[in-house]
Image (tube, grey):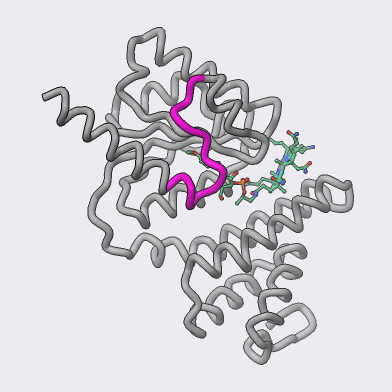
Amino acid sequence: MSGDDLDLSSLSDDELVRQMHDDLYDGLKEEIEEGVRILLERGWTPYSVLTDALVEGMRIVGEDFRDGILFVPEVLLSANAMKAGMAILRPLLAETGAPKMGKMVIGTVKGDIHDIGKNLVGMMMEGAGFEVIDIGINNPVEKYLEALEEHQPDILGMSALLTTTMPYMKVVIDALKEKGLRDRYIVLVGGAPLNEEFGRAIGADAYCRDAAITVETAKDLMRRMHNQRVAVG
Ligand code: B1M
């Protein structure tokens, strides 16, 4: 039940989604979990629950954080509630039975602890048939290099949510170039402050605006890489 004993299951879909935005705003983890389960029981796809209820709710939180209405402790509670909802959806998104597409190492760059977007990208990539190795947050270049060496992925994904941490993606790409490793991997970058121009300027293969676009871009670039290898012999 919600804080004031509101019966979530008595609400219409629209009312429930609006209530979930409020509950996410208030950081009410259990209510978010209940809301997610109710929407799934009503036949919503995991992807619709994710985008309409959770991601949209976090967008509203982000606006008030920006405007100084919400502060870090409150936003942390919202983030925890969002993660609890995502944890229910994750196995469902991964269950699509899609054929194995390739492997990706993904992590948030040094100095940055935002991980909701990265986690969401990982979930969607798993759902599309990619094996995902998530190396977490605050990764220095050495951690990326170690993970690439250990897991030999097709794709390196990097996430940054701060304008102060996004330039670190270039540090990682430059390190790959110096070691002669750049061409071994498809490098995809994402995060709210980035754009296509930035992705090009730092030498990434693509900037991905959201999780769905990451999946499409990854599939497309994997196909191209495969075709090139076949053409070369
Ligand atoms: Co932070 N924070 N935060 N924060 N936080 C932002 C990013 C900010 C824009 C808020 C604001 O002012 N409007 C602002 C950055 C401003 C700037 O740089 N210009 C900000 C700030 C300032 C800070 C602190 C500095 C605040 C402080 O301490 N005073 C601090 C920094 C800490 C640090 O990292 N060193 C901080 C802390 C936090 C919390 C810990 C409270 C919490 C993070 C919790 C967590 O992640 N576990 C938090 C949150 C939640 C946010 C906002 C509100 C929401 C981010 C989020 O999860 N969005 C955010 C506001 C905003 O972004 N508008 C904000 C939902 C998520 C689904 O979207 O992450 O964009 P997003 O991911 C998308 C795409 O970007 C893309 O796909 C995802 C899914 O569609 N994508 C990728 C992301 N990564 C990808 C990687 C890929 C591909 C696509 O690889 C291939």
| Ligand 1 quadrant in view | top right
Report the side of 167 relative to 183 (left or right): right
Report the side of 130 relative to 85 (left or right): left
| Quadrant, the N terminus | bottom right
Residue placed most toward the observer, 153 or 185: 185
On screen, residue 62 above or below 22: above
- Residue 198 counted in the magenta span: no
Q: Position of residue 22 (x, y in %)?
A: 76, 69
On screen, residue 215 above or below 146: below
Start-end of magenta stretch = 203-215
Residue drawn at point x = 59 percent, y = 77 percent: 34
Report the side of 139 relative to 167 (left or right): left
Kindly indicate the quadrant of the structure image that contains residue 106: top left
Report the side of 136 relative to 226 (left or right): right
Residue drawn at point x = 40 percent, y = 7 percent: 178
Q: Position of residue 33 (x, y in %)?
A: 58, 72
| Quadrant, the C terminus | top left
Numbered marks: total? 0
Residue drawn at point x = 42 percent, y = 42 percent: 217
On screen, residue 128 above or below 168: below
